[in-house]
Amino acid sequence: MALDYTRQAFPNEPIAVVQGEKLGRFEGCLQRIRPGESAWGILHNVGVSPGRARFTLGHEFGHYLLHRHLAGADGIFCSTEDIARGQVGGVNIEREADDFAAALLMPLDDFRRQIPPDLKADLHLISACADRYGISLIATVLKWLSYTERRAVLVVARDGFVDWSRSSEPALRTGAFLRAKSGPPIEVPEKSLIANPDPLTDMRVGITQGPSVWFGEESREMTLVADAYDFRASLILLGDAPDRNFGADAEEDPVAIPVDERFRGGL
């Protein structure tokens, strides 16, 4: 699609190469084929799952359509951290490229038919959608979070600390989020499933957690252990709660006093 569409729509600067390369810590990149030439190439890291590579290709195609005018002489290189945190050099282009890839690869109308917005989903249901679209489970969870009417938070941890998190809009509005991008490190709760995976538990259905574990309220925690990528992720489902007037930028709002401050304090 990237090759054919850009050849027709942008014949003076098409994407001419799409291939896998050893990119080290980078997931993918968009760059000129050679300095001084007008044609572009998309590279994705080899040695990752097909779903992860597929999403990276969509992500870099999004960079081409949306951001190629921002690319310097070296192009746009995207690390795992850049893609997860949604920004490069303080500019929120990674989140835009993620949104493009998600819209392209996981059409919203079809996704909503698989998992209606008001449905209390689990990782088995979301995993079925990941298989349907040929995308990684984490990317599929993020797509579900973008439209669900449920209060839900995805927490990704490495070495016992929260690496990054993403909340659904209903969770954001009620203050259920972790400010993992700024501030002191957040240690995962000792009693959480993400800290203590149980091989005897169906972790994609998860367990009910008491108020002392996540956000000061009862929750359902479902966990994915990805040893190959050195991280663990939990999807936290919360019950209903009144809005606390937090907006969509609450995770980056330095003035907001969110639930995560109580969470850090062990309350």
Image (tube, rainbow, N blue to C red):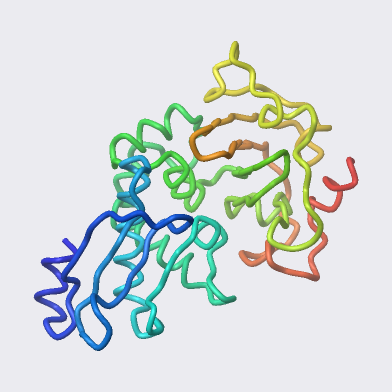
Question: Who's the residue at 33% across and 48% down the image?
Answer: 46
For image coordinates 75% across by 57% down, the residue present is 244
**In the displayed structure image, the side of residue 97 where residue 240 appears, left or right:** right
Residue at x 50%, y 55% (from the top left corner): 80
Residue 63 picture location, percent across and down = 35, 71
Place residue 125 in its image quadrant.
Answer: top left
Residue shown at the point (73%, 49%) measured from the top left? 242
Q: Is residue 120 left or right of residue 262?
A: left
Find residue 224 and report its horizontal and vertical position in percent. 54, 31
Q: Is residue 106 visible?
A: no
Residue 232: where, in percent of width, then height? 59, 36
Considering every residue shown, the one lying at the far bottom of the view is 36
Q: Quadrant of residue 71?
A: bottom left
Eyeballing the image, is 11 above or below 84? below
Total labels: the figure holds 0
Quadrant location, the C terminus: top right
